[in-house]
Amino acid sequence: MHQSLVFLCLLAAIFFHHSRGDVGTAARYGPPFLPTACNGNDQSQFPSGNLFAAAGEGIWDNGASCGRQYKLRCISAAVSGTCINNTIQIKIVDRAQSLVSTPSLKGTTI
């Protein structure tokens, strides 16, 4: 019985994907978007839907976050009515600390 339980636990660990969630803050920034910390002046780094972001220090991970995709959802905002009740998927293309343009809010997660 004990071996069967251990086997089932190992099997579950293999087949179920691990995911993490966290609460953070987001900001917006406008052009110029190039060069980026991830891929310099390469225009092809931007996803076709143009949903991209600069990673804050908490998720930058020495550049390992470049190209990673995250699902984001707004749960509250400083301005009433600006949150939409949808989840979006973004791609990390830059580092927030070294942005060429100025973000709307300093010290954000994304």
Image (cartoon, helix red, strand yellow):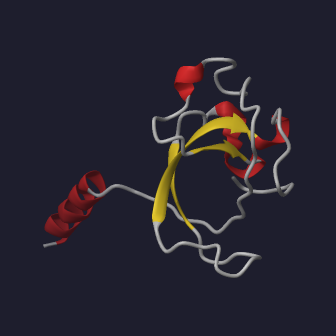
**Residue 33, picture quadrant:** top right
User: How many numbered discs?
Assistant: 0
Residue 41 appears at what percent x and percent y? 68, 17
**Residue 108, picture quadrant:** bottom right
Quarter of the image that includes the N terminus: bottom left
Given residues 30 and 70, the one toward you in this image is 30
Q: Residue at x 25, y 64 (%)?
A: 9
Please state if 56 lies on the left or on the right of 17 as rendered.
right
Residue 65 appears at what percent x and percent y? 60, 38
Please state if 8 lies on the left or on the right of 87 as rendered.
left
Q: Residue at x 64, y 79 (%)?
A: 81
Given residues 37 and 77, the one toward you in this image is 77
**Residue 19, picture quadrant:** bottom left
Rendered view: 90 above or below 45? below
Rendered view: 34 above or below 86? above
Please state if 53 lies on the left or on the right of 1 as rendered.
right
Residue 18 appears at what percent x and percent y? 40, 57
